[in-house]
Image (cartoon, rainbow, N blue to C red):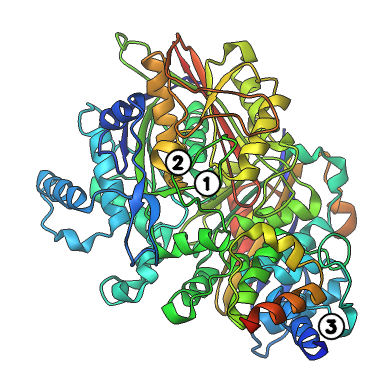
């Protein structure tokens, strides 16, 4: 069975692209917080849980929302929707916050709502909660974006018929360095994104590399 | 699809640096958790399972000599030493060459060198060492592993996922053999975090027990070597035959209230292994001894139709070892299967979970052909894996 | 007491990251958990941290939390009572 990348979102400082369209562009430097909150409000999701997330989860959450709007998740059994994400920094951005809260013994107030985000897969959990996705999920680490790492993992799940579709990609954030590339992989004969916005791409390492090059 | 065999393993915990030392302790009911006073880790005494630092240094020095490394031991972090000793002990007696391009190296860890965030280490190590990919690179380079390491950091199910991924890739023909290693160290970072969740017991943890009141933390490393071909005369080889993960999609720290999703992972793993409940000799579950985890697991076991199957948790022996847990607990399950023994679930006296799971209260001899290992973690993740003896 | 209640409302909003809520939105006697603000188990733990950080009050048994954190007013009453000692 052939699979395609039927939707993607690419977020880098100053730019958000979804399926080739520029959804946001700002050449001025603003912090991640100054960017992500207004952008979230624009999406009108009515999901206050967003404000409790750490920066990494906020980034992944928004990137995933942009992708899921392009596809029809209801076509699929939620227990067979996969999520395979990766990054380089793990949860280091939040780790630093937790470490800070315990660095002074006279001001020792570790916070559970910070500590819970000191694991990179929590971002997957947030996305799963939002859309009730209960299938295979995995968080992998590599020094740089490696299409082969994600392709091998997702492809094996698809070929062995453990998932029908999969959200996969790279979501990395450390202070003001951040980026995300999320892609939705589905069977070629089910993809509806073509009607909405144009071409789909074959699910391949080369296609993922092409999407990653988009800045 | 090729069969995937386990040919070697190693466990390092507070109990000892070999699988056999650890299995002896488990079988004789000896726990590695003890009240520990260490103000660098936590302001007041806590039950912890810490690897003996003196032993760690001694064994690591020995390995540096063995591998003729002209490097100071202090160049390596605590976690790296644990992982290197563990991998060495798992591979050194094997005839295979692991620098072969068809060898997969998988690393499982939740927090890597997280202790390096402390001020006392900042000057001593390059800031890159905080990254999990750097830990993996250092360990892989030590042994000359050729392929880029596959690193899994997925909370407490990482260990099972590392085995599962190696199983899937070997089965699919992507590699011929795999060295699967994992570990996590105890740190102020982690202990303070669990304390903020009020989830630490003041005494050694009691999984599934009516008076359980939280988990105990431990540090450990474990290694498993997998291959697709074994010697023709190998006795009772163990195979991985099924595995799966799932997500609760309920809450980022609290588990599902129904256990349905862990049940899904278990059922998928069983289906892949083509087995039914009657085939499973015992379940080694996650059993952290928190109120909600153990409760959820009992429901999942019931939903999966496995209430008749004996269940244990090894966390009463080693504490919760995070990224190592799935690995070392799988290794102990496999050895229990080989030794035909149901091992007592340490800390258990009377059932304190909603479903009538059969917790193993005393050691029992039993012929076991197949066992199920499960785990759950922050982020709502669950994993299940099946081991079979031929 | 009223001053403490207003202060608590602001502190709760900040500690729990309730960004789209303002102090006027919180009734002193409304249930904090359950319907109302939709607080969860992590929020309950954060409120324990808040009491310790801002008022130096340590809750020994987390099960007492249910009574203490029932509403902003019960929190204020607990603080007033225990800060005397």
* Residue situated in front as seen by the camera: B329 or C59: C59
Q: Which residue is mark 1?
A: B156
Q: Which residue is mark 3?
A: C22
Please tell me which residue is depicted at 70% across the width and 20% down the height of the picture: B305
Are the residues flagged by discs 1 and 3 in contact, CB closer than 8 Å? no
Q: Position of residue B31 (x, y in %)?
A: 35, 37
Please determine if labels 1 and 3 lie on a single subunit.
no
As helix, strand or loop, the secondary structure at mark 1 comes to: loop
Q: From the viewer's perspective, is the residue at label 1 or at label 3 nearer?
A: 3
* Residue situated in front as seen by the camera: B220 or B244: B220
Quarter in which the N terminus of chain C is drawn: bottom right
Are the residues flagged by discs 2 and 1 in contact, CB closer than 8 Å? yes
Please tell me which residue is depicted at 41% across the width and 23% down the height of the picture: B334
A158 displayed left or right of A139: right
Q: Which chain does tag 3 point to? A: C
Q: CA distance from mark 1 to mark 3?
A: 37 Å
* Residue situated in front as seen by the camera: C2 or B92: C2
Query: Can residue B190 be seen?
Result: yes
Q: Which chain does tag 1 point to? A: B
Answer with the quarter of the image where residue B247 lies.
top right
* Residue situated in front as seen by the camera: B2 or B239: B239
The disc placed on residue B325 is 2
Q: Position of residue B290 (x, y in %)?
A: 58, 45
Decide: few, some or many residues near mark 2? Use Cα within 10 Å; few <14, some 14-19, many ≥20. Answer: many
A135 displayed left or right of C34: left
As helix, strand or loop, the secondary structure at mark 2 comes to: helix
Q: Position of residue C78 (x, y in %)?
A: 72, 75
The disc placed on residue A151 is none
């Amino acid at each position: 069975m052939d699979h395609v990348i039927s939707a993607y979102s690419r977020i880098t400082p100053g730019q958000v692209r979804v399926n080739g369209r520029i959804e946001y562009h700002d050449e001025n430097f603003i912090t991640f917080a100054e960017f992500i909150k207004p952008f979230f409000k624009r999406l009108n999701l009515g999901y206050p849980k967003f404000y409790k997330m750490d920066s990494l989860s906020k980034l992944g959450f928004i990137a995933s929302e942009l992708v899921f709007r392009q596809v029809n998740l209801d076509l699929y059994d939620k227990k067979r929707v996969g999520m395979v994400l990766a990054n380089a920094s793990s949860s280091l951005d939040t780790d630093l916050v937790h470490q800070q809260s315990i660095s002074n013994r006279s001001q020792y107030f570790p916070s559970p709502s910070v500590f819970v985000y000191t694991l990179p897969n929590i971002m997957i959990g947030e996305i799963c909660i939002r859309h009730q996705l209960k299938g295979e999920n995995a968080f992998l680490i590599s020094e740089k974006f490696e299409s082969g790492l994600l392709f091998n993992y997702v492809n094996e799940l698809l070929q062995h018929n453990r998932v029908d579709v999969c959200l996969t990609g790279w979501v990395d954030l450390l202070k003001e360095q951040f980026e995300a590339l999320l892609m939705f992989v589905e069977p070629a004969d089910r993809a509806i994104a073509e009607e909405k916005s144009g071409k789909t791409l074959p699910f391949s390492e080369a296609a993922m590399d092409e999407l990653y090059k988009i800045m | 699809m090729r069969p995937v065999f386990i040919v070697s393993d190693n466990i390092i915990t507070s109990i000892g640096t070999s699988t056999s030392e650890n299995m002896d302790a488990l079988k004789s009911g000896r726990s590695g958790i003890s009240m520990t006073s260490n103000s660098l880790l936590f302001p007041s005494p806590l039950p912890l399972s810490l690897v003996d630092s003196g032993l760690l240094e001694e064994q690591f020095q020995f390995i540096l000599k063995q591998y003729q490394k002209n490097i100071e031991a202090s160049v390596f972090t605590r976690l790296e030493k644990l992982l290197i000793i563990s991998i060495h002990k798992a591979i050194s007696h094997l005839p295979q060459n692991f620098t072969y391009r068809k060898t997969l190296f998988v690393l499982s860890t939740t927090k890597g060198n997280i202790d390096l965030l402390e001020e006392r280490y900042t000057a001593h190590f390059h800031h890159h060492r905080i990254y999990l990919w750097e830990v993996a690179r250092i360990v892989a380079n030590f042994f000359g592993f050729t392929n880029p390491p596959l690193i899994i950091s997925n909370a407490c199910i990482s260990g099972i996922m590392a085995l599962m991924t190696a199983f899937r890739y070997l089965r699919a023909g992507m590699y011929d053999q795999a060295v699967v290693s994992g570990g996590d160290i105890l740190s102020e970072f982690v202990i303070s975090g669990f304390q903020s969740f009020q989830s630490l017991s003041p005494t050694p943890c009691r999984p599934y027990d009516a008076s359980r009141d939280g988990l105990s933390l431990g540090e450990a490393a474990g290694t498993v070597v997998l291959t697709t071909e074994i010697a023709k005369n190998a006795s009772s080889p163990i195979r991985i035959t099924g595995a799966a993960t799932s997500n609760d999609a309920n809450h980022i720290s609290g588990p599902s209230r129904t256990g349905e999703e862990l049940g899904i992972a278990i059922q998928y793993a069983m289906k892949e292994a083509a087995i039914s409940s009657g085939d499973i000799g015992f379940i080694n579950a996650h059993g952290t001894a928190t109120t909600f985890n153990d409760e959820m697991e009992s429901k999942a076991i019931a939903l999966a139709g496995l209430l008749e199957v004996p269940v244990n948790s090894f966390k009463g022996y080693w504490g919760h070892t995070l990224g190592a847990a799935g690995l070392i607990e799988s290794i102990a399950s496999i050895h229990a299967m080989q030794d035909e023994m149901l091992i007592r679930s340490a800390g258990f006296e009377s059932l304190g979970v909603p479903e009538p799971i059969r917790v193993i209260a005393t050691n029992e001899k039993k012929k076991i052909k197949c066992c199920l290992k499960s785990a759950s973690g922050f982020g709502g993740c669950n994993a299940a894996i099946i081991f079979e003896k031929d | 007491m009223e001053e403490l209640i207003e202060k608590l409302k602001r502190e709760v909003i900040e500690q729990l990251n309730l960004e789209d809520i303002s102090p006027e939105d919180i009734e002193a006697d409304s249930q904090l958990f359950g319907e109302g603000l939709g607080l969860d188990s992590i929020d309950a733990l954060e409120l324990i941290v808040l009491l310790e950080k801002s008022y130096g009050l340590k809750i020994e048994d987390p099960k007492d939390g249910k009574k203490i954190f029932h509403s902003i007013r019960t929190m204020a009453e607990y603080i007033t009572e225990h800060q005397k000692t």
